[in-house]
Image: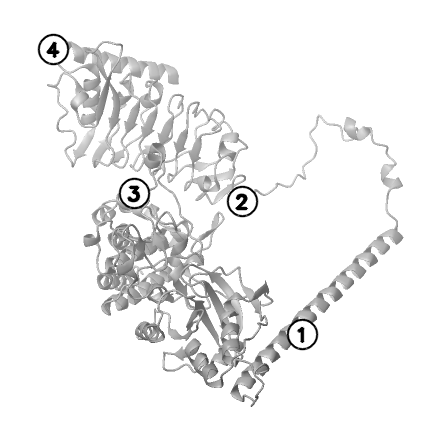
Amino acid sequence: MNLTRSFAHKFWCFSCLFLLLLVIPSAALNLDGTLLLSFKNSILNDTLSVLDNWNYDDETPCLWTGVTCEIIGGTPDILRVVSLVLPTKGLLGSIAETLGFIDHLRTLDLSNNFLNGTLPSSLFFNAPELQVLSLSNNTITGNIPNGFRYVEVLDLSLNFLNGTLPVEFGGDRLTYLNLSSNNLSDLISPQFAKNIPENATIDLSFNNLTGKIPESTALSNQKPESFRGNLDLCGKPLKKLCAIPSNSSAPPPNISTNSPDPAIAAIPHNIVSQHKPKPGTIAGIAIGILVGIGVLAIVCLYVYQLKKKRTVEASKEIQFRGAAYKEPKNSNNKDSELSIAKETTRSLSSWPCLTIRNGEETSEATASDYDENDNQNIDIEDHQVDYYHNKEQQNKKYQNERSLVMVDGKTELELETLFKASAYILGSSAAASIVYKAVLEDGTAFAVKRIGERGFERFKEFENQVKAIAKLKHPNLVLLRGFYWGDDEKLVIYDYISNGSLANASYRKIGSSPYRMPLQVRLKIARGVARGLAYIHEKKHVHGNIKPSNILLTQEMEPIISDFGLHWLVHGKNSYRTADASSSRHFGSTRSTTTIVASPRAELYDYFSIINERPYVSLADFTGCTSPYHAPESLKNLKPKSKWDVYSFGIVLLELLTGRVFSDRELGQWTAGLVMEDKNRVLRMADVALRGDVESREDAIVECFKLGFSCASLTPQKRPSMKDALQILEKIACSPSC
């Protein structure tokens, strides 16, 4: 019946076209042009006037906007349409059925428009040469038809397609299939991917698919990201395993319950009784296991006590050395006189490089560049001391080589007290070689960053720079308490923030099950970061390295910006002016201007590349590429601008709303005006974990997206100031929807 209707429909279309050609003069438009004009007539609104030069008066459509022709059949006069490419042209209307009757059409790209209606079946049944079909980011509805036998690249993402995946899908020649961000539901049929090649790239993410992923080679070869956003989907390649149904039903009627399987029937019936363990044997095995566990526990306890004893002895030795310095004994024997200053300096400078063993205490999260799973304890290692021949030279050397200065005006800390503190390695980076959590004897904790020997060469310059940074005090800026100046290294002491950073916060997805962080908490974090940056800009400074790992979180989820001014301490105040012209030094990293060129297909179709930044990675780890949180113009300028921070804040705000990082290509497609025009598409970009909040706070979320895209504009002049961005966020917080 369906075939009869399809044949009748085709016959009617060809009849109409034949009659139309009879009334057109011989010198008028050819058949391909007539079919394209039918598509033009289906467009209700052409805001950019891209179809104005499509006219009946032309002999050929080859000069029309978006149309490409080639010579078919070897005759120069026969030019046929092979490509129609009109992406992002603001076209509003439907896709005409007649496009499928263009015999030699190979490429059809109408992505990023406002096309609606359903997919015309003629595109799949009547276009045997069609190879590339891209209709992504439109408002197309309805089911996906069958019969994709010829298409090699098919992109129908970001539409409103519903129903199930077609059983007779085809896809014999597919190399790329993207059906993500639609409303597809129900199970994935095993027949769906039966004919799709094994090396094809498939993306079915962010739909409503359920059940187990079929055991198809084409599907199992995909990455887990290709199926994310389908909360009820399970099976490989996802890490979410499917539940095994219980099989308590009776055996099928055609199988006799009395006759065993032939393979089982060959086993002797008395084999079970012959090898059944006796009660005495079971008791002996149990006793042996208990004895083994007891011996293992004794060994572990002995090792623990031995290590604890060594730690106590080392601590007593350090205390003895400190006491020896306070009350130096009079000794005329130069061979027996210790240089306490030199020895203490070496011990402290070796503190960041001490022998590492697995920690018995799990450290909480703190400063920006660390991994909270890498907490390690420190044992103190004895060092050989040097001898001095002159007591006055010894004291002078001591004063010049080491000094602990507290700059906040409140904290009182002695060098010996800091030296006796328990230290736990939290991570490492290029800017601050090692980051520690230092716990004093009274339980007070600090975050200590070891800078090393770079940067300032004079104590006074370094002290002035630290004091200048410490003067900036704000609830959303981490407080700098003091610093240590030594011959071999420098230490900077900050407040310890115990709840980790935004880089490892719970709004990120864990596997395929996102942990829900409420919208109100995300907006609270965004407002706090905006307040801190607005304060920095008000004081005529620039942070220059805003990213999730530099945004610490308190127990109340209040954001604290870290690493402000760290670049100056590491490289000196004139480092920007002395940087090489071919690269830009930026907070401890040399940012290469190398351009990474993707393949044409990846450039056109890789819409959802996600960058997962490790929470303890410094910017210096991005060698050969730039951080996605850095403004594009920062590659060309040596001196940071406040607009850099605005861009970084915009990327962080969009990541808070969506759970992913936006690429430059995606940012270029959005403007504040387009956000307001296409609210439905914007709301669909929100994090899956925010679905409940989206329904009741649509206006607030759209305003946040509008602000995020404005701040992350690729044109610096179009970005608002942080003061204006903060005012917008405050208004959103006070609105009834929030």
- Mark 4 or mark 1: whose residue is earlier in sequence: 4
Residue 600 vertical placement versus 643 (above, below): above
| Circle 2 residue | 239
Q: Nearer the viewer, residue 551 or 143?
A: 551
Mark 3 or mark 4: which is in front?
3
Q: Secondary structure at mark 4?
A: loop
Q: Are marks 3 and 4 in contact (CB under 8 Å)?
A: no
> Marks 1 and 2, how far apart in space?
45 Å
Where residue 381 appears, as percent x and y from the top left, is: 59, 70
Q: Secondary structure at mark 1?
A: helix
Mark 2 or mark 3: which is in front?
3
Q: Are marks 4 and 1 in contact (CB under 8 Å)?
A: no
Where residue 448 appears, as percent x and y from the top left, is: 45, 70
| Circle 4 residue | 25
> Marks 2 and 3, how far apart in space?
30 Å
Identified by mark 3, the residue type is: Arg
Residue 277 vertical placement versus 557 (above, below): above
User: What residue sits 55% from the left and 32% below the top?
Assistant: 215
The N terminus sits in image quarter: top left
| Circle 1 residue | 309
> Marks 3 and 4, how far apart in space?
47 Å
> Which numbered marker is on residue 665?
3
User: What residue sits 31% from the left and 61% below the top?
Assistant: 738
- Mark 2 or mark 4: whose residue is earlier in sequence: 4
- Mark 3 or mark 4: whose residue is earlier in sequence: 4
Q: Nearer the viewer, residue 160 or 397?
A: 397
Identified by mark 4, the residue type is: Pro
Question: Residue 604 lies in what quarter of the image?
Answer: top left
Where residue 457 appears, as percent x and y from the top left, is: 36, 69
